Image (spheres, rainbow, N blue to C red):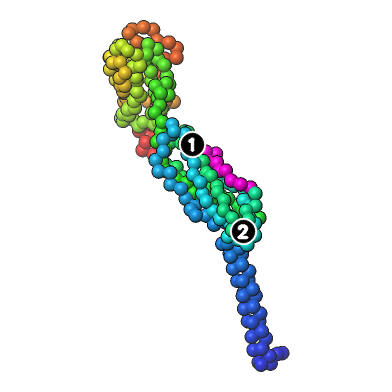
Amino acid sequence: MLSPRKRVSLYVMRRVFILFVAILLGQSLAAQDDSQAISLVFDATEWNMGRINEEDGPVSYTFHYRNEADHSVAIERVYTSCGCTTSDYSRKPLKAGGEGTVVVTFDPEGRSGRVERSITLVFDSGKGRQELRIKGRVNPRPQSVAEEFPYDLGGGLRADVTYRSFGKIAQGNTRSMALILYNSSDDPLWVTPEWVEQSGALELFLPEQIAPDERVLMTMTYTIGEVVPEGGLLRDSFRILIEGATATEENLFTTRAVVLNAESTAN
């Protein structure tokens, strides 16, 4: 059994050893931090594009950096958060004290609205990492008539959609939805709906005449009564006759709704 004096001495030696290891570990971590801190240093790490227009095409920004290490450093890998963002940079080692650039290009096509993207650079044999960020807002390009109203109903009449799902509707309730019709012709069009499949629960509201270059709403309203259809599903379809002419097979609108009876609603 150790004497009290020896136990105290052993305790002190252990404490000194632990303190010595902690000091060495701290110095090692500090050396790693210093190594990263004095590698590639960027003048700015974020670019605010502000508002840009989608139709104007790609925009670019140049990030500047310098090598503050005491050895040559190369950018080895680059990761981007989106395929819409690319980067151009030199892969050659940059001497100590040298300066370089990273050109970041953002393509706004199909990306209207708020934008936030990141580019991560890996350099100095993997010991250094730097994230560059870009942000801004993209104004959408004007759509053509064919893009805004892709469904050609004939005679110059076009629609934005030809199908509406009303989802679930409880008994005793009503639900309305609408679609947009556009007269792309130079003459007024007289239009009337023609039922193909009718549940009796759907009501249509459609102006009789659509002026040239006019957009109108066609409103569709389901009113759910006491009778629940078989399977609880309502199906309706109709065409729009233009000037009384027979509509084409492609000129077909469909709607669907699921009726919830009183028991299922209560549960």
Q: Residues within 10 Å of mark 1 (few under 14, many from 20)?
A: some
Q: How many marks?
A: 2
Q: Is residue 194 visible?
A: no
- Going by the image, does 17 lie left or right of 46? right
Q: In the rendered image, which quarter is residue 234 located in? A: top left
- Residue 145 location (% of width, % of height): 39, 21
- Going by the image, does 74 lie left or right of 63? right
- Residue 246 location (% of width, % of height): 39, 7
Q: In the rendered image, which quarter is residue 151 located in? A: top left
**Secondary structure under badge 1?**
loop
- Residue 199 location (% of width, % of height): 37, 19
| Disc with the residue nearer the chain's start (2 vs 1) | 1
- Please report the residue visible at 40 percent of the width from the left and 43 percent of the height from the top: 50
Q: Which residue is mark 1?
A: 58
- Going by the image, does 6 lie left or right of 158? right
Write down the region rendered in magenta.
Answer: 81-91
- The foreground one among 147 and 174 is 147
In the rendered image, the residue lying farthest to the right is 1
**Secondary structure under badge 2?**
loop
- Please report the residue visible at 48 percent of the width from the left and 36 percent of the height from the top: 58
Q: Is residue 134 visible?
A: yes
Do the residues bearing badges 2 and 1 touch, measured as CB atoms within 8 Å?
no
Which residue type does callout 2 highlight? Ala
Which residue type does callout 1 highlight? Pro
- The foreground one among 14 and 91 is 91
User: Where 29 sits versus 146, above or below?
Assistant: below
Between the C-alphas of marks 2 and 1, the distance is 33 Å
- Please report the residue visible at 41 percent of the width from the left and 31 percent of the height from the top: 141
Q: Which residue is mark 2?
A: 96
